[in-house]
Image (cartoon, rainbow, N blue to C red):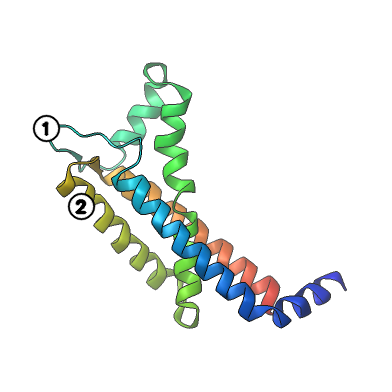
């Protein structure tokens, strides 16, 4: 009964909700651009750094956690996942008519790779395959959340 009333309310306010979500996506995109290219965690070094070995950085943080503070481990592992959950959600929302897990995931991976290459070219971070893995995991969680919400609200 409550779910039916909730669905009716969502249906009545669908346009307003979509506009709000698009505005939120725009703000999220601006924040992401700031965070990955300009923000306080960016390192500006004379040597460009990269890691092309999968799970090297993840393993380093997990096995040598005594070398790093909890904040550093959290930001580098959990933060890389959480930060990209909205991207998976919003890409699913933007392309909801053709929203298949594989297609949406591939688009997210393309965006993430562009970000990583951009950081490398601009020398504002480390091009790291582990970031791509963790960011993609976040996107897949976002896609899954979108699909669950869509199923709950639209069936």
Q: Distance between the residues labelled 2 and 1?
A: 16 Å
Find numbered disc 2 in the image and state the secondary structure of the residue it sits on: helix
Q: Residue 46 carries which label?
A: 1
Q: Which of marks 2 and 1 is in front?
A: 1
When the figure is inspected, residue 139 is found, relative to residue 34, above or below; the finding is below
Residue 110 placement: quadrant:
bottom left
Which residue appears farthest toward the right when viewing the image? 1
Q: In this view, does 46 lie to the left or right of 66?
A: left
Q: Is residue 147 left or right of residue 25?
A: right
Q: Residue at x 35, y 49 (%)?
A: 34
Q: Mark 2 points at which residue?
A: 117
Residue 19: % across, % down: 56, 74
Q: Residue at x 27, y 54 (%)?
A: 115
Residue 113 placement: quadrant:
bottom left
When the figure is inspected, residue 30 is found, relative to residue 11, above or below; the finding is above
Q: Which residue is drawn at 48% across and 64% down?
A: 25
When the figure is inspected, residue 85 is found, relative to residue 10, above or below; the finding is above
Which residue appears farthest toward the left when viewing the image? 47
Local crowd at mark 2 within 10 Å, few (<14), some, or many (≥20)?
A: some
Q: In this view, does 20 lie to the left or right of 95?
A: right
Q: Nearer the viewer, residue 41 or 54?
A: 41
Q: Which mark is residue 122?
A: none
């Amino acid at each position: 009964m409550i779910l039916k009333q909730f669905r009716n309310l969502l249906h009545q306010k669908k346009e307003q909700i979509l506009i709000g979500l698009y505005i939120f996506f725009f703000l999220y995109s601006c924040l992401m651009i700031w965070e990955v290219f300009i923000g306080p965690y960016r390192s500006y070094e004379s040597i460009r750094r990269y890691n092309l070995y999968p799970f090297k950085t993840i393993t380093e943080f997990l096995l040598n956690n005594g070398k790093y503070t909890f904040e550093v481990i959290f930001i580098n592992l959990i933060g890389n996942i959480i930060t990209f959950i909205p991207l998976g959600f919003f890409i699913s929302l933007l392309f909801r008519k053709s929203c298949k897990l594989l297609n949406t995931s591939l688009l997210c991976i393309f965006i993430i790779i562009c970000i990583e290459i951009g950081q490398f070219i601009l020398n504002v971070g480390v091009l790291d395959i582990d970031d791509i893995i963790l960011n993609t995991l976040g996107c897949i969680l976002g896609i899954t959340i979108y699909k669950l919400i869509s199923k709950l609200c639209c069936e």
